[in-house]
């Protein structure tokens, strides 16, 4: 499948409408997973962009006790830390109807991602793959998950032939050390979504799709050009 045909864009005039539509679509995917195999697995991203989407999804009625939720990546900080993505997921998504879902953290109680990797890999290996849905975000530097430009394990994380599910990642633009699912692991999914907001990110994404200028080297371009899983982009101004 040509890369240009592997990405579809759903544009919304306001971000509340996007949040509702994306939440309904994800809920549909989760229901389908539960119907087909008795369980569902959802991977979500942190940051400020998904808050409205989380709030909408949290109120949708479905068989949440059969849903497991994991992050696509995490800062190596405990859940009590203000920059913890797990803290965000618990405060915004695992509320209301979704409070019955089971959250599986990427962070382990260890001083570094490397020190906690054995425990994290065992925990991730026990999840019921494939993902029913993966929701990615994107930074203004072209990163997605913890695939940061200049990341110390970036080539390994983006290697579509790789077999490792999770890796530590350090990069100048990442702040804390990170832990992230690799790209081939995230592509083991029934559906892949990229949620972005704002005109700057819309243009950045367009440049990355076309490989224009600096955007030809943005890590997100590897997600957009792979042909394994179609990418549904959800964008609002």
Image: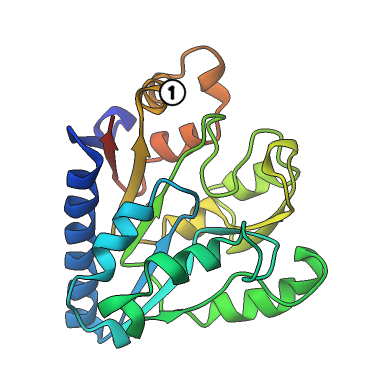
Q: Looking at this view, is 68 or 75 the one in front?
A: 75
Q: Which sits in the foreground, 139 or 58?
A: 58
Which residue extends farthest top? Answer: 213
Q: Is residue 52 visible?
A: yes
Q: Residue at x 22, y 84 (%)?
A: 63
Residue 156 is left or right of residue 141, and the answer is right
Residue 188 lies, with reference to residue 8, above or below; the image says below
* Placement of 207 over or under 37, stated as above or below: above
* Residue occupying the point 46% across, 55% down: 45
Q: Quadrant of residue 77?
A: bottom right
The residue carrying mark 1 is 204
Q: Is residue 5 left or right of residue 228?
A: left
Residue 209, percent from left and from top: 39, 25
Quarter of the view holding residue 237: top left
Q: Residue at x 46, y 57 (%)?
A: 186
From the viewer's perspective, is residue 204 above or below residue 230?
above
Where residue 151 sits: x, y (%)?
71, 41
Residue 199 horizontal/vertical position (percent): 35, 23
Looking at the image, which residue is at 31% across and 67% down?
132
Across and down, in percent, residue 110 comes to 79, 74
- SS of the residue at dot 1? helix
């Amino acid at each position: 499948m040509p890369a240009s045909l592997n990405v579809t864009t759903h544009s919304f005039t306001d971000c509340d409408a996007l949040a509702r539509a994306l939440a309904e679509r994800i809920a549909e995917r989760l229901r389908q997973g539960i119907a087909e195999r008795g369980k569902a697995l959802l991977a979500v991203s942190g940051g400020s962009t998904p808050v409205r989407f989380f709030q909408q999804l949290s109120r949708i009625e479905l068989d949440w006790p059969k849903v497991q939720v994991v992050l696509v990546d995490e800062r190596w900080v405990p859940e009590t830390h203000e920059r913890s993505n797990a803290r965000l997921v618990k405060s915004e998504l695992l509320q209301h109807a979704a409070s019955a879902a089971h959250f599986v953290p990427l962070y382990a109680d260890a001083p570094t991602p490397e020190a906690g990797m054995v425990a994290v890999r065992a925990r991730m290996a026990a999840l019921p793959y494939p993902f029913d849905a993966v929701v990615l975000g994107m930074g203004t530097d072209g990163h997605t998950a913890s695939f940061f430009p200049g990341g110390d394990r970036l080539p390994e994380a983006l290697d579509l032939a790789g077999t490792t599910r999770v890796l530590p990642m350090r990069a100048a633009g990442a702040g804390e050390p990170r832990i992230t699912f690799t790209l081939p692991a995230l592509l083991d999914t029934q559906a892949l979504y990229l949620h972005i907001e704002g005109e700057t990110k819309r243009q950045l994404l367009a440049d990355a799709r076309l490989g224009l200028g600096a955007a030809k080297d943005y890590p997100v371009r590897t997600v957009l050009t792979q042909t394994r899983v179609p990418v549904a982009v959800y964008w609002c101004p």
